[in-house]
Each structure stands twice: as C-alpha cells, then as structure tokens.
C-alpha cells in the first residue's frame, strides 16, 4: 500500500471532449477500449490508489446501439479520471412498462453484493458526458445531480429540483433515503420523487457548474409516460420509509461478467 493516493483532480484531463466516438458491434468496441479491463467492465489505475470505488449503474432494455456508443465513450472517460470503477447494465426482462428506479435499486444491491463500492453513479444509457472535468466521484456531503446541461435541453436546467439523467450518491446517502421508490412504472416521476426524498432527510442537491456538467443525448423514441406519476409523487414522503430498498423484490435471471460490463438480467 505504498502507492500514493490518486490526485483529487487528475492531471491529464482534456476538458471539452470532441465529438463522441461511434459504437458499432460490441466486439468492435471491446477491441477498441477493452485493453486493461478486468472482468465485468472493471478497471483501476496501476500507479496510484483510487479514492473512490465507483459503480456505474445503467438501467437498460432494447437499446443496443446506444449501449455500444455509451461503452465506447465512458470507459476512456472514466480511466482518464483514474477511478476504480465497474459498469453494471441492469436489464429488465419482459414487456411490462419500464421501471427505471427499480432497476437502479437493483443495481445498487447487486453491485454492493459483488464488491464494497462506496459511490454510485446512476446513468441513463443515452447520455454522454462532453467534458472530462465532470468528475464521476461522490460528493461527501450532498447527493449530486450530474447531467446539468443537456444538448437537447439547450444546455439549460429545465427546473431547479431535477435529478434525472445522471446522478451521484454515496452508499450512505442512498441508504439514508431508502433508495428510489419502486412504484414508478413507465416514463417519468421517479427522479422528482428522489429529489423530495433527498430534501426530506436534510440533504440538498449539489451540482457542478453547467460549463462542465454538459451532456449529449442520443436520440430515441420516448417511452410511455406513467399516468400515475403525479399521484405517486404526491404520496411520496409518506411512502419513503417503506417503499424503496427495504421493499425491493425481483428475480435475478442471469448475471454475466463480460469484458465491457457486468450484465444483470432481472424480472420485476
């Protein structure tokens, strides 16, 4: 353990990154960015001791072309930041409405079961960071909303309490709010519910400046909106103590450590 700690701000960051790299077949992405990866899409620097163990949790279904672009870009990005990280793709089986928040809870549980991660980045597969000074670490004090400025939203925050897209929470913070609600099926609402949880336990949402926390969104068809999202939000605080990590039920169908990521297929 005589190695020095990795620097708080890695020395070789480029700042604004050029156009994102194309994806293509997963095996092509593997050939391009797979060198040095440990099984399950994990990596750690060899010449310094990382400060955080970071799990990137990606909720997933039917987005293969996005996944390959995401992986082609995120691995080099995270390695430049000298992080000890693993990428977890949590895939919802079947055709029921997508439950993003539940998949994020599952990712937290599965990742912590495999390794003592202390930092969690909850990351939509269609968002690519545009600036490597956007550090994928966990704030000690407050949860952080990462995707502050997204190209399709004109690089502006749509509203003050937004927590969707990409967010970072330490293990302690996530456990303190009992994770996400499991009740949001279909698109929307779960991130606002999390914002309310964060505030109700005395945290607030922190953010990097929007000159750095910039993202490109890959184009996609919008999911079916959740008709109950407002009703669920309204009852959110009452439910928080018993709806979340402590009420999570799912069936793990398969876990596979591939070169670029750890794949967890689940039935909700």
Image (spheres, rainbow, N blue to C red):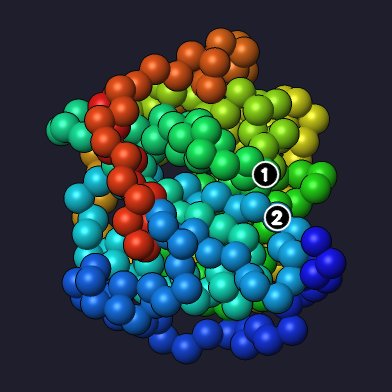
Residue drawn at (56%, 58%), measured in percent from left and top? 85
Q: In the image, is 183 to the left or to the right of 135?
A: left
Sequence-earlier tag: 2 or 1: 2
Q: Which of the labelled discs sits on residue 118, or is there none?
A: 1
Tell me where residue 219 appears, x and y as whole percent: 28, 65
Residue 24, numbered circle: none
Residue at 42% across, 76% down: 35
Judging by the rendered image, the residue that carries numbered circle 2 is: 52
**Residue 45 horizontal/vertical position (percent):** 63, 71
Q: CA distance from mark 2 to mark 1?
A: 7 Å
Q: Is residue 226 left or right of residue 210?
A: left
Q: Quadrant of the N terminus?
A: bottom right
Q: Is residue 192 above or below residue 238?
A: below
Q: Residue furthest front?
A: 2
Res. 242 visible in picture = yes
In the structure shown, which secondary structural element does the residue marked by tag 1 occupy? loop
Task: Give SS at disc 2.
Answer: loop
> What residue appears at the point 51 percent right and 70 percent down from the top-left corner?
129
Question: Residue at horizontal 16%, vertical 32%?
Answer: 94
Image location (x, y in percent) of residue 248: 45, 19
Does 178 sit above or below residue 135?
above
Q: Residues within 10 Å of mark 1 (few under 14, many from 20)?
A: some
Q: Are marks 2 and 1 in contact (CB under 8 Å)?
A: yes
* Of residues 83 and 195, the one drawn nearer to the viewer in this rendering: 83
- Residue that sits furthest to the left in the current view: 95
């Amino acid at each position: 353990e005589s190695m020095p700690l990795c620097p708080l701000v890695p020395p070789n960051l480029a700042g604004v990154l050029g156009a994102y790299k194309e994806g293509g077949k997963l095996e092509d992405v593997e050939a391009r960015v797979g060198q040095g990866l440990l099984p399950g899409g994990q990596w750690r620097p060899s010449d310094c001791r990382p400060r955080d163990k970071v799990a990137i949790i990606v909720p997933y279904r039917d987005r293969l072309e996005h996944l390959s672009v995401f992986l082609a870009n995120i691995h080099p990005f995270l390695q430049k930041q000298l992080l000890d990280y693993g990428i977890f793709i949590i895939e919802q089986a079947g055709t029921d409405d997508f439950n993003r928040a539940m998949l994020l809870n599952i990712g937290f549980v599965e990742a912590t079961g495999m390794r003592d991660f202390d930092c969690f980045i909850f990351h939509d597969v269609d968002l690519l960071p545009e600036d490597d000074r956007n550090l994928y670490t966990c704030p000690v004090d407050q949860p952080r909303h990462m995707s502050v400025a997204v190209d399709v939203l004109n690089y502006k925050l749509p509203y003050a309490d937004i927590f969707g897209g990409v967010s970072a929470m330490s293990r302690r913070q996530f456990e303190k709010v009992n994770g996400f609600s499991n009740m949001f099926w279909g698109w929307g609402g779960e991130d606002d519910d999390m914002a309310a949880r964060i505030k109700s336990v005395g945290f607030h949402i922190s953010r990097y400046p929007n000159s750095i926390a910039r993202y490109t969104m890959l184009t996609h068809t919008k999911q079916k909106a959740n008709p109950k999202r407002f009703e669920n939000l309204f009852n959110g605080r009452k439910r928080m103590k018993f709806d979340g990590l402590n009420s999570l039920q799912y069936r793990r169908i398969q876990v596979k450590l591939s070169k670029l990521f750890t794949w967890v297929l689940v039935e909700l």
